[in-house]
Amino acid sequence: MKKTLISIALGLVISTHFATAQPNSQPATPANPKAPLLVTEFRPQPQQIQAANMTAEFLTRFHYKATPLDDEMSAKTFDRYLKSLDPDHVFFLQSDIDVFNSARTRLDDAILNQDLSVPFAMFNLYQKRFKERLTYARELLDSEFDFTVNEGYKYQREKEPWPKDEVAMRELWRQRVKNDWLRLKIAGKEKEAIRTTLSKRYETTMTRMNKLKSEDVFQLFMNSYAMSVEPHTNYLGPKAAEDFDIAMRLSMSGIGATLQDRDEMATIRELVPGSPAALSGKLKVGDRIVGVGQGANAPTVDVMGWRLDDVVALIRGQKDTSVTLDVLPADAGPDGKHVTVVLVRNKITLEQQAAKKSIMEVKSGDATRRIGVIALPTFYQDFDARRRGDKDFKSATRDVARLLGELKKEKVDSVLIDLRDNGGGSLNEAVELTSLFIGKGPVVQQKNAQGRVHVERDGAGVIAWDGPMGVLINRGSASASEIFAAAIQDYGRGLIIGENSFGKGTVQTVISLDQMARSDKPQYGDLKMTVAQFFRVNGGTTQLRGVTPDIAYPSFVDADTYGESAYENALPWVQIKPADYQTVGNLKDVQGMLQVRHEMRISKDKEFQFIKEDIAEYKQQKEKKEISLNEAERRAERDAREKKIKEREAYRASLDCKEKSSEKCLKAKSKLNNNQDDGLQGNERSLAAELAEEKANKEAKDVFLLEAANILSDEIELIKTNKKIAAEVMPKLAGKTKEAQ
């Protein structure tokens, strides 16, 4: 089966292969910032040169928007590559850019003439400048900053010029470091603690740069080319290609431990329930894997300081094979006693990305409505298992059909499909999932580069749920999510609730360059290439405009900064003939009444008022583009912000504490005393604190989901009390439900 994908531009995982350096060069060590900088010199590898040629062949001949690789494309690639290296203009000098400009129309020649030295030279200078800036930042920590003067730091620098000389660059970095210091100072940190925190922060940043490899440079450059053709075309290096396959099939062979890089050690962040790691009882969250061996009780390779993906590659392996881990327990110090753990690898299912159900109860007068919620993070499918004829292949549609069957037995009144931040996935799954609600009708139309239109539908078309339903979307709902939501809307099958969706109306296929080159081992990577545009059954497209919800929520997102419309080279919105389809319901009348009830409800809802206040403040801050470096001014801003947060938490606590002994009340009171900004970033907090914050965010009241449930509850009430509305909402589905197979 062809891997046809309609996913949002994915975050590419850094690959781990083919690093080279000039003879006798050593990676820079940030432990001594005053020592001479030693910079790794990256060079292109033969397989990368061949991969670049194959990629250009496909993009210039077979892409939906086939574009010549000429001087014009070179200029676009140059601009995108430069932006990917230094988006905020804080590393390069203007003189560096002047030198680079000679290569502006030569990047096409670099690919076609099989000489990638120019883009690699650009990266090598970037790496040198990066290390110079971080070294200077650490030197500044010995300075004394005056926080009484009135000066500002322009933190939004994308449209600012590059510093004209080294003096201007040092002034810029003085302001950056002063801002970092001030944030920690306002958070209550003492001088030495601030110096230690920032020194480690800059050292960690430098260390990440030291771990980059030739494959990373190549992937960055090739994506600059691929995305200059069209936003959703990507080059995937061998490691990124492997991770993409895992994400689509939601399974892999390994031990079932999620790892995080903390203090140069692969630290266990989560154990997958039922996995070898969890069942062994010998590993726990916070344990650090410092050595890995292949086989039972095999000698281990020291992996301290390794890139995380390199460690993961050693731990993964064939099912039923053994791996030996050298573990430093979570409660042991750096010199603590190590523990040896031997595990047998098994198939691991990534259930956190699978469809999940829950039931929300909404009170309406004397009645209680039960709303079944199915959250679907991605449209996943195990392509290879389906191609092999595996009857139990992993599939989003199969999982949702099963969950719908369970919700029917639990007698829910309506179903809500939550597609927030679902960036897409398999086209097959989008079509088959839609058929669970509409039957055998057409779902989406595809138009290829030659202009031929093909209508996609599920041949089986077995309806699994014929009751009221809704779809919850936001700006992160893209592609396959938009196909599903658009079809449900066009058929009049259910309400679309939330924000305007992303606006991605293109179809991708994944091409294995290794297969093209007949390579027995992964070395060339994959090309994810746009091959078609999809259209709604009504003839419109979600491209650029997305799916407009029937009932819209307030939104933080600006169309010019996030979504398809933010891409300067996105395909235009066009229209084709509608497909031959028949609506199954008419929600126009009920939609107006639900809108009125929704507006009345949120006008009295404090949480929605908070959201509107935050949106207004966000838009105001966005326009400033500059932050004060005056301590008194920043403290006043911080105090006002935290006062507002405390007032909100006090309000929430008053609601939670109606039952004063409840656990919910205790948590609310605890939050009142722990809402101050600590000035820290990312994994600078302890793992326990990070996990606790993540858990608290998951448990926080989801006002958008709750309001969607209220809207569906209102719909049920209108259907039950108004025969005319009941006849219009779903007249053509009554009695057609069958148990999904």
Image (cartoon, grey):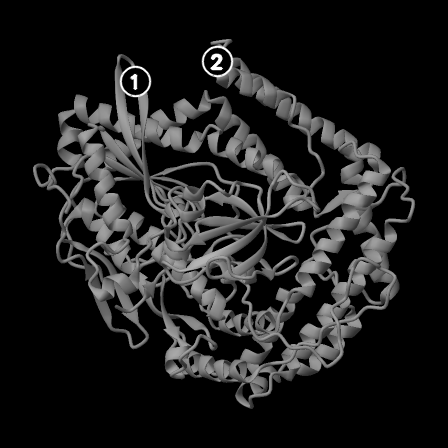
> Residue placed at 74% from the left, 64% from the top?
130
Left or right of 689, for residue 11: left
Can you give x and y, in whole percent of width and height, for residue 153 in the image?
78, 48
Q: What amino acid is found at the position of numbered circle 2 in the picture?
A: Ser
Crowding at mark 1 (Cα within 10 Å: few <14, some 14-19, many 20+): few
Q: What amino acid is found at the position of numbered circle 1 in the picture?
A: Ser
SS type, badge 1: strand
Can you give x and y, in whole percent of width and height, for residue 256 in the image?
44, 49
Give the number of callouts: 2
Can you give x and y, in whole percent of width and height, for residue 605 in the image?
46, 22
SS type, badge 2: loop
Q: Is residue 624 above or below residue 560?
A: above
Distance from Cα at disc 2 to Cα at disc 1: 25 Å
Q: Nearer the viewer, residue 624 or 705?
A: 705
Q: Which residue is under mark 1?
A: 364
* 2 vs 1, front mark: 2
Q: Residue furthest front?
A: 297
Q: Is residue 150 above or below residue 123?
A: above
Q: Nearer the viewer, residue 291 or 512?
A: 291
* First reached walking from the N terminus: tag 2 or tag 1: 1
Left or right of 100, for residue 740: left
Q: Residue furthest bottom?
A: 113
Left or right of 56, for residue 620: right
Question: Circles 2 and 1: CB distance less than 8 Å?
Answer: no
| Tag shown at residue 662 | 2
Quadrant in which residue 393 is drawn: bottom left
Q: Is residue 330 above or below residue 321?
A: above
Left or right of 356, for residue 215: right
